[in-house]
Image: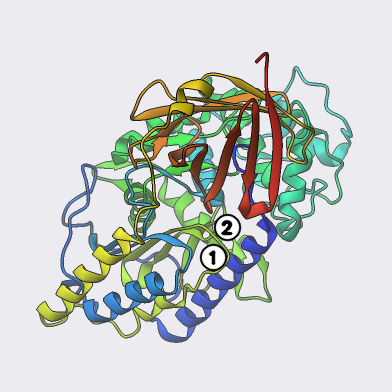
Amino acid sequence: MKTILTSKAWRWAVAILGIMLLGFLAYVFLPGRGKIPNLPAPDYWPTEGWRTTTAEQQGLDSTKLAEEIQAIHDKHIAIDSVMIIRNGYVVLDAYFSPYAGSFPHDLGSVTKSVTTTLIAIAADQGKLQLDQPVVSFFPDRTIANLDARKKSLTVLDLVSMRNGMESKCLHGDEPTLDAMRSQPDWIQAALDRKMTSQPGTQFCYDSPGMHLLSAILQQATGMSELDFARQYLFEPLGIQDVAWETDPQGYYHGWGDLHMKPQDAAKLGLLWLQQGKWESRQIVSAAWVSDSVMAQSRMVGNEYGYGYGWWVSLIEFYALGRGGQFIHVIPSMNAVVVVTAGGPDLDLAFLIKTFLGAPAQLPANPAGQAKLTAALSAAAQGSSAPPSIEQPDIAGVVSGKTYTCDTNPVGVTNFRLEFNDPKAGVFSMVRYGQETSSPVGLDGKYLLDSQGTAQTGYWEDSQTFILEVFDIGQLTRRFHFDADRLEVTVPEINLTIKCQVQNP
């Protein structure tokens, strides 16, 4: 695990509540229900990039959009970006400092919608069957608790979140994930769980089950999930800049942590609006698209459900991730909304207000457009940059040295910082016996590693280096050097770690 976050379950609960509110407002105010309508093909395909129009050209009010963007900025709501597309054209592409859309954002469990899509593509190719038993993909493994129910578990049971395996389900998904991640082999841990119900009968939101799909896809196709995605989904849509985390055995996280730019995430929404077709190519079958956004399971009374990797309400569907990541698709408005965010204090109702009663087109509104441009600029600039001094002499002294740490609750045993390049440093640490190294921007820019970690850093004073880690929620590591000692504090989780230089 690359980033320490707090109150994960709370973030999930707030995200779900926000989406429920959106669904309620949509149900009350927006026209059109049922399956995805046969929408006309877009005027162009955004394979090489999206085209932009004014909000009014697509029936939206730029003045209202400006007020909403300004409110997010002024209230410090933990939203990183908002993108609104109607009729295939971008009418809003907003970024809130420090995120500028220049690197892929962690999409959390939006990844599940991608994983299930890849399973569908592999099934279309005949590489696997949806009714194929899960255990058949792991002939070389000895699987615990292998009873008749587990033997009957199919790929489609995993896809639809009805796998019947021991799990704490939606509100206990993080502890369920942590139990899997505490084991040396995550796939084995996910497979070994006891069965608690007959597969295919009960909905239970279960991330380890989605991780099994990553291994199943690799076993069936001979390609890793990322390689398969690049060839059959990302490249046809013009998606190139992605990062994805892997488990100790090298399997990509089937449940989460796919990093993608908002503009690329929006292409997935358009693909679904076009019933799986992109340009002249059927990327995923129209039948799968239709079935995936029908409620295969119901929850929250009778109004909300879960399809195949997509959450479903009466007139909309969405891919949802912790901390407020989502791709929200409103077929009746031919609209896609993508949000990336970083915390529990989300107020998502403003998005639906944008569409209430929206006509096909509005008169030009130069004053509103100017107000929107100003609001977007203010959001992108954010607050003033933190104070920073030039690299002090101590940077050369501590660079490359390993600091061994006292026992601490997050399992870190040592840290190392390198300052050999004025524009880019390297941060390394060993946590729970696993070493990770990531680049650090030293010129005000974030640098991204292959696992999706984005970091920038600066010297606060002659002895203190500040490392800013961007993820779902920002995290600050404060390194204070004093002779051969190092004290690392992480204020977001009230953590202090004391370390000593190794072999001074």
Name which quarter of the figure residue 423 lies in: top left
Q: Nearer the viewer, residue 116 or 177?
A: 177
Disc 1 on helix, strand or loop?
Answer: strand
Disc 1 or 2, which lies upstream in sequence? 2
Q: Nearer the viewer, residue 168 or 479?
A: 479
Checking the image for residue 312, the label placed there is 1
| Residue 204 percent location from the top left of the image | 73, 56
| Residue 417 percent location from the top left of the image | 52, 26
Q: Indicate whether 176 appears above or below 431.
A: below
| Residue 383 percent location from the top left of the image | 36, 61
Name which quarter of the figure residue 381 lies in: bottom left
Name which quarter of the figure residue 503 lies in: top right
Which quadrant holds the N terminus? top right
Residue count near mark 1 (Cα–Cα under 10 Å), binned few <14, some 14–19, many ≥20: many
At label 1, which amino acid type do we have? Val
| Residue 6 percent location from the top left of the image | 67, 54
CB contact under 8 Å: marks 1 and 2: yes
Residue at 76% of width from left, 38% of height from top? 180
Mark 1–mark 2 Cα distance, whole angstroms, equals 7 Å
Residue at 16% of width from left, 64% of height from top? 53
442 left or right of 90 in image:
right
Which quadrant holds the C terminus? top right
226 left or right of 263 in image:
right
Disc 2 on helix, strand or loop?
Answer: loop
At label 2, which amino acid type do we have? Gly
Q: How is the image coloured?
A: rainbow
Checking the image for residue 180, the label placed there is none
Q: How many marks?
A: 2
444 left or right of 164 in image:
left
Residue highlighted by disc 2:
307
Q: Indicate whether 347 appears above or below 167.
A: below
Residue count near mark 2 (Cα–Cα under 10 Å), binned few <14, some 14–19, many ≥20: many
